[in-house]
Amino acid sequence: MEMSYVTFYRTRDRFSIYILLASGCEVDGYEHEIKGVYFRFADKDKCEAILSKHLARKLKLCTGDIVNAIRETHAIFYDK
């Protein structure tokens, strides 16, 4: 059986994290480091496609989903 590897998308940019969470991307984990909190998302290709659509101003998201993403991550960013 052939093994397939999952490539992850890793970022500490808060706005990218909010957009990816609001878009339904799966968080694989997060890491507290000196420079900040890094979120690791499954499916790098999907994450990059979503962020590309956002930069091109073609991504449509529900504001409620963005607010929920901000609330969900607030404790991770500010609680140590």
Image: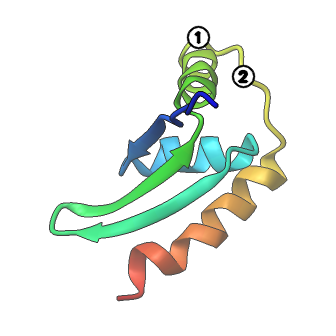
| Residue 3 shown left or right of residue 65 in the figure | left
Q: Are marks 1 and 2 in contact (CB under 8 Å)?
A: yes
Question: Looking at the rendered structure, which numbered label has been put on residue 59?
Answer: 2
Q: Quadrant of residue 27?
A: bottom right
Q: Is residue 38 above or below residue 57?
A: below
- At 53% from the left and 24% from the top, the residue drawn is 48
The CA span between labels 1 and 2 is 8 Å
Which quadrant of the figure contains the N terminus? Answer: top right
Residue found at the far bottom of this picture: 80
Q: Is residue 10 left or right of residue 74?
A: left
Quadrant of res 73: bottom right
Q: Secondary structure at mark 2?
A: loop
The residue to which callout 1 is attached is 56
Residue 2 position in % (x across, y down): 59, 27
Residue extending farthest to the left is 34
Q: Give above or below for 60 relative to 57.
A: below
